[in-house]
Amino acid sequence: MPIITLTSDLSTKDYYLAAVKATAYRLISDVKWIDVSNHIPPFDMAKAAFVLKNVWKEFPEGTIHIVGVASEWTKKTPYAIVKMQGQYFIGTDNGFFSLLFDETAVPDWIRTIKLQGDEDLSFPAKSIFVSIAAKIAAAEELDDFSTEVESYRRRPLPIPVVEYDNIRGMAIYVDSYGNVITNITRELFEKEVGSKEFNIVIRRGDTDLNRISRTYNEVPQGEKVALFTSEGYLEIAINRGVEGSGGGATDLLGIRENDIIRIEILEE
């Protein structure tokens, strides 16, 4: 039973999502369909990459991932398939894959999808990507529908800036609880901060976030907390903020995506 996931900006308000799924059920027998998220902001490939990046390694080998965000085809941004650690990723080679995978990741292979000239390019998730997923699931000969290439396009990704006494990162994602996830990794934090004292400075100038917790409940309900996600990104949250305190970190602390998050490293 093939597993197919979808990450898209199709939402659930229109018929588009149902059309994609109906096509999959028609072309692929016994398919197991999993929606990663269909509420990516329109054309926001960085958000789509972040969401899928945090979950794809949980799937077994052979899983096929369809990405229906910013899927416009051009000669410079063809449709592509990337096989990474035994899983397949179908999308547009417009820089998305470089956002999805670590810079040091080595794909099993990369292939561009052959077009016949009569495909409906206005809705590729339905008309092209599902069909390619069906061919992969059926173990059809790859050369019949794709051509191997050496690399995918690169897209610059904002990285934290390290200075002698601080780290400047940014908020890159706000989840449905209002938790703010930054691009500061546990690895970078441990390297630059280590056992030194520190203050996390957020948008409104608060500097009393000076410890990393393991769980939200290490602080009282309604208090702000800093911790690392399971994928190793620094997160700023309000313990049970949505349920009991009128909002999460994005509302109560005024943090928005792309805001600067700074860690002041104090002298030992």
Image (spheres, grey):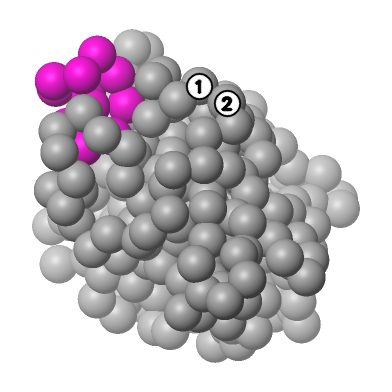
Look at label 1 and name its amino acid. Gly
Which numbered marker is on residue 204? 2
Q: Is residue 32 visible?
A: yes
Say what amino acid the circle numbered 2 marks: Arg
**Closer to us: 227 or 266:** 266
Q: Which sits in the foreground, 230 or 107?
A: 230
- Residue 246 in the image: above or below residue 26: above
Q: Magenta stretch containing residue 92, yes or no?
A: no
Going 40% across and 75% down the picture, which residue do you hit?
A: 87
- Residue visible at 52% across and 61% down? 198
Q: Disc 1 marks which residue?
A: 254
Q: Which residues are magenta?
A: 238-248
Q: Give the x, y percent position of residue 35.
A: 27, 43
Q: Residue at x 57, y 76 (%)?
A: 268
Residue 57 image position (x, y, % from top left): 34, 72
- Asked whether, in this view, residue 163 is left or right of residue 87, the answer is right
Distance in Å between CA atoms under marks 2 and 1:
7 Å
Q: Nearer the viewer, mark 2 or mark 1?
A: 2
Q: Residue at x 24, y 76 (%)?
A: 60
Q: Position of residue 235 (x, y in %)?
A: 41, 50
Q: Residues within 10 Å of mark 2 (few under 14, many from 20)?
A: few
Is 243 in the magenta?
Answer: yes
Q: Which mark is residue 31?
A: none
Tag 2 near tag 1, CB within 8 Å: yes
Element assignment for label 1: loop
